[in-house]
Image: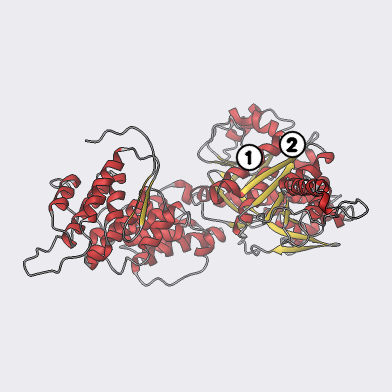
Amino acid sequence: MFHCESQFIVEHRSLDEMVIVPNKLARCIFVFAVSVIALAGCSSAPEPRTERDPVPDSRAPDVETTTADTLLAEARAAAPGYQQQELLLSAATQYLDEGKTQKAGVLLSTINAQQIRPDAANRLQLQKARFAAALENWQRVLELTDDLERQLNQRAARTQLYTLRYQAFEHSENWLDAAQQLILRTRYTDDIDNQAIWQILTRVPAEYWRESRYQSDELTRGWFSLLEQLTQALDYNRPIASALEAWQRTYPEHPAQNIVEDMLTTEIFTHRPQRIAVLLPLTGPLADHGMAVRNGVLGALSADRPEIVSFYDTAALSPEDIQQQLLTSDVDFVIGPLDRAAIEAFVPYAQGPWNQLWLNQQPSDMPMQSEHAFFALDSESEAESAVRWLDSKGHKNIILLGPDTQRGRGTSARLQNWWQIQHGEQSIRSGFYSSSGDMAEAVQQALNVNSSQQRIDRLESVLVRDQSLRSARGEAAELEYEVRSRQDIDAIYLLGDANQVRLLKPYIDVNLSAFGKRIPVYASSAVHQEQRSLGENDLDSVYFSDAPWTLRDSLEPDLKQQLSNAMLPWTLNRQRLVAMGFDAFEMVPKFSIMLRFPGYQYPGLTGQLRISEQIVERELDWARFDGHEIKLEVQGYVNSRGRN
């Protein structure tokens, strides 16, 4: 037995590749590696096979009777050649089965793929993939297993292959491929978890299910058809039960039958809320906000909607009174409250037989209830949506510039944490300013212009001191230079409001290298204001996100025309709040299912909407300032909502 004392990295270059074992491994592995390397060195060339050579069993060893240490001892005793190499492979496989990843990694690095038979070479590839999975190197897992499916013919090996690929796709959040690997796995093992397949499929983006795709096998076709029918029912507000029953008739023998039967007997999948309460400030200082949301709810309440809707003024009624009226009225869905004070006051009274969509962020000390979610139009959630969009555009290295406030730093920290997980620690940096006087320096530091200027200053100082470079008149030689900004940055996101962005943009323009690539500048909806003539040149070429209803006239044009005449002035902020009320009411019939289908996403007036971890996430539209015009940059979706 080896005694483990300290941590270090063990690496060994074998004849075909190098395996690097993480530095969490202990010194004991070094001793083990030395002995194995010595063993591997004895087998420099394969022996010719004869009729007397026994053929090693290609199946995995019996873990109850044969340990990895025993197999390793047999390998030491074996003659150099393919037998020894395949015994090493069996030992490495057994070490992985025993959870001794480090020893398995060292053994795998010593095996020469040229000295083993083709079927063993395939098993070697599979075990290397297992080792990569233990290191959580999921990209390597996919590379090693990419072409193995056609090479493996044993049930256990195929089960292992699909399990590894499922894990790799799941960790990269490639839900569709992950689900397909689980479905393939069911053909080769009795250990089948249909609930796991179902949970992964519900995370697949709904856009995939909106297009029917032919599947060659009945099993996959049944799973996909179930998601397609549910998505269509949600899109057009059709009864979920009818969609599920139609699927049952088409696929009576499918393994998802039990899942569908459970949904049909669960009220949240079959019950549509009928009595809806909307809690808003309809009087007092926030009445304008409350009335805008109220008008949005009424705009969504078309003549053929069966729901009964009641409004409660949170500025005039106490939380106790509101709760009592909700209980008396048998309300089964609540929208609101809207403002932070009303939310905090109502939290103790939210325990009732209803689902609830709160119209703001969740208070930090508020316990989450299972049938509740939070829908906010705040700058923090918009910024989080923006960085996800920047990631989808292929940006790798970005700069955040924002006000030096608690909110500015908090938002920046959350965005930075998310981005670093995706692209690494050095892929994002933040700059802050306390006032307009700090902006120039904040931009220069973020773009590393200060470092460039300091290098130029040092060079000038050297030239001035060098007498050999003085002219006959005693003047120092003139240094021609250009201050250069960072060249590894491919996007800048500004967290400030419109006035701050107007002041920042010129500093960014003058500090970017004249001959370098132009770095796109992005901002939030705060820069989108009615008075675009004020400083619009300073916003030229700035991209910004906003609710689709504020950028596209094709969305609910009749409602926009009606309210623009009734709600004067028809400001962009009012439009956003109207859109919020509209979307909140439209979400009611699908709410419970959206809580359980994080992949389901549909077009709303405030953005492309989905519920993830009980938070309504929005993907916004993007536009660009182009001189005196605003040009829609990304039309992410069309208004295809079904009204029923």
Q: Which mark is residue 413?
A: 1
Foreground: 529 or 90? Answer: 90
Q: Which mark is residue 404?
A: 2
Query: In the displayed structure, would residue 464 be above or below residue 253?
Result: above
Tell me, yes or no, if residue 337 can be seen here: no
Q: Which quarter of the figure is the N terminus placed in?
A: top left
In the picture, measured across the screen, residue 626 lies left or right of residue 418, that is right
Foreground: 276 or 39? Answer: 39
Estimate how packed mark 1 is, as few (under 14), some (14 to 19) or many (20 or more) residues with alpha carbons within 10 Å: some
Foreground: 527 or 110? Answer: 110
Estimate how packed mark 2 is, as few (under 14), some (14 to 19) or many (20 or more) residues with alpha carbons within 10 Å: some
Q: Which residue: 62% across, 60% down?
A: 393
Indicate the secondary structure of the residue bearing disc 2: loop
Render colour scheme: secondary structure
- The three-letter code of the residue at mark 1 reads Ala
The location of residue 513, given as percent across then percent down, is 76, 57
The location of residue 632, given as percent across then percent down, is 74, 63
**Rendered image quadrant of residue 540:** bottom right
Tell me, yes or no, if residue 159 can be seen here: yes
In the picture, measured across the screen, residue 517 lies left or right of residue 531, that is left
The location of residue 222, given as percent across then percent down, is 38, 64
Foreground: 644 or 550? Answer: 550
In the picture, measured across the screen, residue 3 lies left or right of residue 299, that is left
- The three-letter code of the residue at mark 2 reads Asp
Whether pointer 2 and pointer 1 mark residues with C-beta atoms closer than 8 Å, the reply is no
Q: Which quarter of the figure is the C terminus placed in?
A: bottom right
